[in-house]
Image (tube, rainbow, N blue to C red):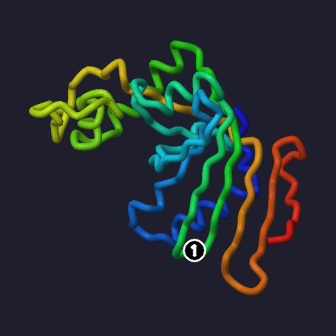
């Protein structure tokens, strides 16, 4: 594991801190590619850093995004932090994990969720037709076994662009893992 933080990580942390306690500071948009080649985007919740340039998200294994990522593991994520007037674009790849590590990390993430957050994995299949009277629990109690549908998505980030929207002109920078995260200035 690489413990040295890339130079964009403190900038992202500072921008998230400027957002305050708003839950939106943890929301980012994940873009994937559907089986027909069309783009797909959805909002997901940041769950933490597994390493200096490796981030974790959680999903439902039954979801379209899980199937899309199994076909095409390359992604781009957009993290717009409006109070900070900053947009981070993160490109990377879904990491395959050894089964022992995957189970450990799934367990760790499952235990870190509160009962209301766990409830999502007790709902019917995402995207399936709505059935009248289907159960949508509001909580899954502590001690509830991890459902098979509980999916850890771990992404290795290999490129980050930051667009700072304050001032004139805006400021745009890029860092790439292939250049040892050297900062490159770009036109906004």
In the image, residue 132 lies at what x, y percent?
12, 33
Asked if residue 141 is positioned above or below residue 88 in the image, the reply reads: above
Q: Mark 1 sits on what residue?
A: 84
In the image, residue 182 lies at what x, y percent?
87, 54
Q: Label 1 neighbourhood size at 10 Å, few (<14), some (14-19), many (20+)?
A: some
In the image, residue 135 lies at what x, y percent?
14, 31
Q: Quadrant of the C terminus?
A: bottom right
Marker count (numbered): 1
Furthest-bottom residue in this view = 168
Residue depicted at x 59% and y 27%? 35
Asked if residue 70 is positioned above or below residue 46 in the image, the reply reads: above
| Towards the viewer: 145 or 160 | 160
Secondary structure of the residue carrying tag 1 is loop
Left or right? Give the position of 146 relative to 18. Answer: left
Furthest-left residue in this view = 133
Left or right? Give the position of 152 relative to 93. Answer: left
Which image quarter: residue 81?
Answer: bottom right
Residue depicted at x 48% and y 29%? 152
Which image quarter: residue 31?
Answer: top right
| Towards the viewer: 25 or 123 | 123
Furthest-front residue in this view = 36
Asked if residue 81 is positioned above or below residue 42 in the image, the reply reads: below
Residue depicted at x 47% and y 27%? 105
| Towards the viewer: 130 or 169 | 130
Left or right? Give the position of 42 relative to 122. Answer: right
Residue depicted at x 67% and y 55%? 89
In the image, residue 103 lies at what x, y percent?
45, 18
């Amino acid at each position: 594991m690489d413990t040295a933080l890339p130079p964009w990580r403190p900038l992202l942390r500072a921008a998230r801190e400027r957002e305050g306690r708003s839950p939106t500071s943890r929301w980012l948009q994940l873009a994937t590619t559907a089986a027909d080649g069309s783009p797909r985007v959805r909002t997901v919740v940041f769950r933490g850093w597994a390493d200096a340039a490796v981030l974790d998200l959680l999903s439902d294994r039954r979801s379209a995004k899980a199937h899309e990522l199994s076909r095409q593991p390359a992604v781009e994520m957009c993290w717009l932090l409006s109070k900070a007037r900053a947009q981070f674009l993160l490109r990377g790849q879904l990491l395959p994990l050894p089964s022992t590590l995957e189970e450990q990390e799934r367990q760790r993430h499952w235990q870190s969720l509160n009962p209301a957050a766990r409830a999502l994995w007790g709902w019917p299949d995402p995207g399936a037709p709505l059935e009248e009277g289907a159960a949508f629990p509001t909580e899954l109690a502590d001690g509830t076994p991890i459902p098979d549908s509980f999916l850890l998505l771990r992404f290795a980030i290999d490129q980050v662009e930051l667009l700072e929207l304050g001032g004139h002109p805006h400021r745009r920078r890029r860092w790439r893992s292939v250049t040892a995260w050297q900062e490159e200035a770009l036109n906004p």
